[in-house]
Image (tube, rainbow, N blue to C red):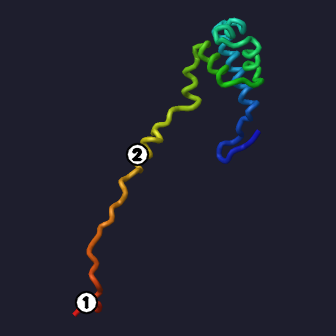
């Protein structure tokens, strides 16, 4: 497992895949649906669903389809929450009109004044 300063141990990709697969399997069993039926509802193959549940790699598309079929796609908002401040708003607030220079007629120094 890798570590990150201040965060303690972090899960590896394989660990995340295994944990997500276990949670999907648990949710499927809680709902009382078999793998074949869930695969059909999610429009994925049964082997694809088995790979997802067993943490053997999957695509984001499969993950989203299975969550939607389990009526659990609201969990995706927690994965990557919307930013409180839009990057466009940040740019707009920091963009200012260019500063305009004030031009004044130049007065020559006193010792250069023509006589």
Which of the marked residues, 1 or 2, is nearer the chain's N terminus?
2
For label 1, the crowd category at 10 Å Cα-Cα, with few meaning under 14, some 14 to 19 and many 20 or more, is: few
Residue, x 57% and y 25% (percent of image)? 76
Q: Quadrant of residue 73?
A: top right
Instruction: Tell me the tag on residue 39.
Output: none
Quadrant the N terminus occupies: top right
Cα distance, mark 1 to mark 2? 48 Å
Viewer-side residue, 82 vs 42: 42
The answer to whether residue 60 is above or below residue 93 is above
The answer to whether residue 36 is above or below residue 102 is above
Looking at the picture, how far across and down is residue 70, in whole percent?
Answer: 61, 13
Q: Which of marks 1 and 2 is in front?
A: 1
- Secondary structure beneath dot 1 equals loop
**Cβ–Cβ under 8 Å for marks 1 and 2:** no
Looking at the picture, how far across and down is residue 78, in whole percent?
Answer: 56, 28
Residue beneath disc 1: 113
Instruction: Tell me the tag on residue 92.
Output: 2
Looking at the picture, how far across and down is residue 41, in whole percent?
Answer: 64, 9
Residue, x 64% and y 12% (percent of image)? 42
Residue 77 located left or right of residue 21: left
- Secondary structure beneath dot 2 equals helix
């Amino acid at each position: 497992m890798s570590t990150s300063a201040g965060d303690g141990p972090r899960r590896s990709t394989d660990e995340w895949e295994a944990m997500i697969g276990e949670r999907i399997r648990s949710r499927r069993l809680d709902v009382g649906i078999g793998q074949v039926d869930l695969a059909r509802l999610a429009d994925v193959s049964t082997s694809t669903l088995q790979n997802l549940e067993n943490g053997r790699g999957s695509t984001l598309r499969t993950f989203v389809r299975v969550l939607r079929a389990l009526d659990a796609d609201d969990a995706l908002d927690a994965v990557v929450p919307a930013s409180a401040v839009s990057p466009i708003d940040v740019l707009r607030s920091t963009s200012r009109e260019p500063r305009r220079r004030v031009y004044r007629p130049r007065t020559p120094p006193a010792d250069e004044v023509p006589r």
